[in-house]
Image (cartoon, grey):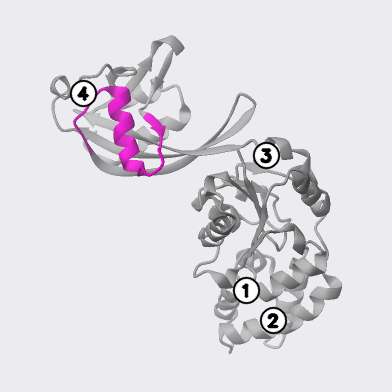
Amino acid sequence: MIHAVLFDLDGLMADSEPLAEQAWNRVLARYGHRLDPQTLRDILGLRVIDSAQFLCQRFRLPLTPEQAMAEREQFFLQAVPTQLRAMPGLYPLLAALDEREIPLAVATSAYRRYALLALETLGVADAFRVVVTGDEVARGKPHPDIFLLAAERLSVLPARCLVLEDAPRGIAAAEAAGMVSAAVPHPRVPRADFAAAHWLFASLEAVREELAALLQTERYDAAGGVVVHDGRILVLLRASRSEVRLPKGHVDPGESAQQAALRETQEEGGYGHLAVTGDLGTQTVVFEHDGRRIVRAERYFRMALTAPPEAAFAGAEPQFQPVWLAPDEALARLTFAAEQEWVRRAVGQNPFL
């Protein structure tokens, strides 16, 4: 299911954070400041220029971000060739991926000059087909640009990419890119901050031990609708499984989420005359099925009938038995907890429900 693996660099492969902290402190010391734990967390995962801008504002430095970055780089780059070390477990993990012939990319917020120097220093430059750096994109993490560019250069669909990250910003960027994410949390960041990750590991060695399962992770996009009519919610009954659910299905290639939601709602519920009245947003559901981990990114829309229920039936036999329930009853009877959230959002959008 996974066709490529995208690695972050700093804090995941390279134990570079102590060197970066030392470099920034040498810059800040000239102005009577020093990095504190909260500031370190605030700049974790940012591009250097974004970190420089943040620090210039926080400490009111008499420097432009470009000047602060240049000073920091002078100290940082001097230390890299002799002091940079690999994170534990990196080399066995790369060897295991090489055995499986999985194409790899580096997708880092770092700028290119440093990233190439770091990979050479660690002796892993040849392991990666693609290196994408923060100075090649307009927006850094948590925006998805870095990861999407890496997938494009590898000629791999985003949904078939696994991202390894140590920072919450990187996990958010992976989600925004539509990729599978695995977090190896940085020691400075509480594990609770990685709730959005699809996998969570204590180390790169733990990633290697679970590699077979990781590479079988499947991600796909789904879309559905919460149809509201006369204060009731349309739910679908599948008696053979004692299941009550909302209309939902795959987003097909070339199809928008809204088009898929309308199609699936019509096919499953049998009501042909529907209008989208609101976007309820997205959520990601992770579950196990037949020994595989499934990552399903759902997007739901609030819908209304444009004709009475008796006149709006599409004609074809619906796939499920449509049932109209009051919102409270729908919440109580829905089989899947994740779908209850969509009903709550739909109710919240309409004060008359």
Q: Which residue is mark 2?
A: 72
Q: Quadrant of residue 61?
A: bottom right
Q: How many angstroms separate mark 1 from mark 3 (CA)?
A: 31 Å
Q: Residue at x 75, y 78 (%)?
A: 76
Q: Is residue 107 above or below residue 30?
A: above
Q: Determine crowd level at label 2: few under 14, some 14-19, many 20+ residues with C-alpha closer than 10 A.
A: many
Q: Determine crowd level at label 1: few under 14, some 14-19, many 20+ residues with C-alpha closer than 10 A.
A: many
Q: Which residues are magenta?
A: 248-275
Residue 223 is left or right of residue 29, and the answer is left
Q: How many angstroms separate mark 2 from mark 3 (CA)?
A: 37 Å
- Amino acid identity at mark 2: Arg
Is mark 4 in CB contact (under 8 Å) with mark 2?
no
Q: Which residue is mark 1?
A: 48
Q: How many angstroms separate mark 4 from mark 2 (CA)?
A: 65 Å
- Amino acid identity at mark 4: Ala
Question: Count of labels shown?
Answer: 4
Q: Determine crowd level at label 4: few under 14, some 14-19, many 20+ residues with C-alpha closer than 10 A.
A: some
Q: Position of residue 319 (x, y in %)?
A: 34, 18
Q: Is residue 223 above or below residue 176?
A: above
Question: Closer to the observer: label 2 or label 3?
Answer: 3
Question: Closer to the observer: label 1 or label 3?
Answer: 3
Q: Residue at x 74, y 82 (%)?
A: 26
Is mark 2 in CB contact (under 8 Å) with mark 1?
yes
Q: Position of residue 248 (x, y in %)?
A: 38, 30
Which of the image's four quarters has the C terminus? top left
Q: Position of residue 185 (x, y in %)?
A: 69, 52
Residue 165 is left or right of residue 303, and the answer is right
Q: Nearer the viewer, residue 344 or 96?
A: 96
